[in-house]
Image: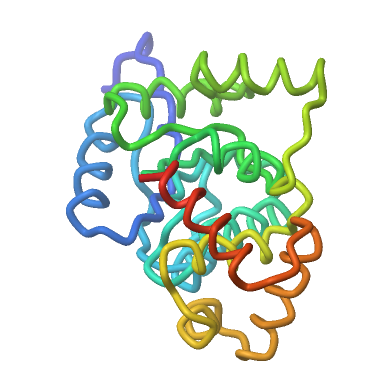
Amino acid sequence: MPDADASPKPQKARVLVVEDHPIVRYGLALLIDDQPDMCVCGSAANISDAKQLAQQHSPNAAVVDLALGDESGLELITHLHQTAPDLPVLVLSMHDETAYAERALRAGARGYVMKREAMDNVLTALRRLLAGGMFVSDKLSAQLLTKAVSRPTSPLDSLSDREFEVFRLLAVGAGPTEAARRLRVSVKTVEAHRGHIKEKLGVKTAAELARILSRWADRQA
């Protein structure tokens, strides 16, 4: 006969992991599954599989890398925010938060953790998101607060997410053909985005744009 005083165990929070590196994806799954209050309901290496798993399992939270092979995690974050606005998304990325975090948060993410930080921060961040909060580093929090108060502007802030992706790819050495392949658009579209980038950054020649791309790439290295 079951113990009348026994209470049912609380249900674990279901977490979707989206990461293209198999070792990192496996390690994250082990870390999360080892917790008493959460478990991995699915893991994916690309946007298509992630969308399918999100629809199939209705996760309580998602961990998303920004660089998914040739795909951009920003696209997935935007999709998840549109289709499941209550789903908290935590970005786990190798990209410097000063360059990418604000854009990820605008796309719908609720937290940002860099891969070089302690893995315990991932668990802390996930629990905060699951409780309805947000998670960013103290450094980023101060940066966002300062920006909200003083409203300093950067020319890159004027770029759309797709224009920024084109800018990033050009900065790391991808030509228009390679950028078009990675973004799954035509070369003509990439060239149009490059034209808009030049206009928004106030440059007139390819040499000027190349210098800006080079300086930005050096800061991210």
Residue 118: x and y, percent? 27, 24
**199 left or right, relative to 41:** right
Q: Which quadrant is home to the C terminus?
A: top left
Q: Residue at x 49, y 62 (%)?
A: 171
Residue 169: x and y, percent? 49, 67
Residue 33 to residue 71: above or below: above
Residue 203: x and y, percent? 74, 62
Figure label count: 0
Of all residues, the one furthest to the top in this rendering is 5
Out of 22 and 215, give the one closest to the viewer: 215
Q: Residue at x 43, y 32 (%)?
A: 113
Q: Residue at x 48, y 80 (%)?
A: 175
Quarter of the figure with residue 185: bottom right
Residue 129 to residue 172: above or below: above
Out of 123 and 190, give the one closest to the viewer: 190
Out of 18 and 202, give the one closest to the viewer: 202
Residue 5: x and y, percent? 37, 9
Q: Residue at x 46, y 25 (%)?
A: 125
**155 left or right, relative to 103:** right
The colour style of the image is: rainbow
Q: Which quadrant is home to the N terminus?
A: top left
Residue 144 to residue 109: above or below: above
Residue 124 to residue 22: above or below: above
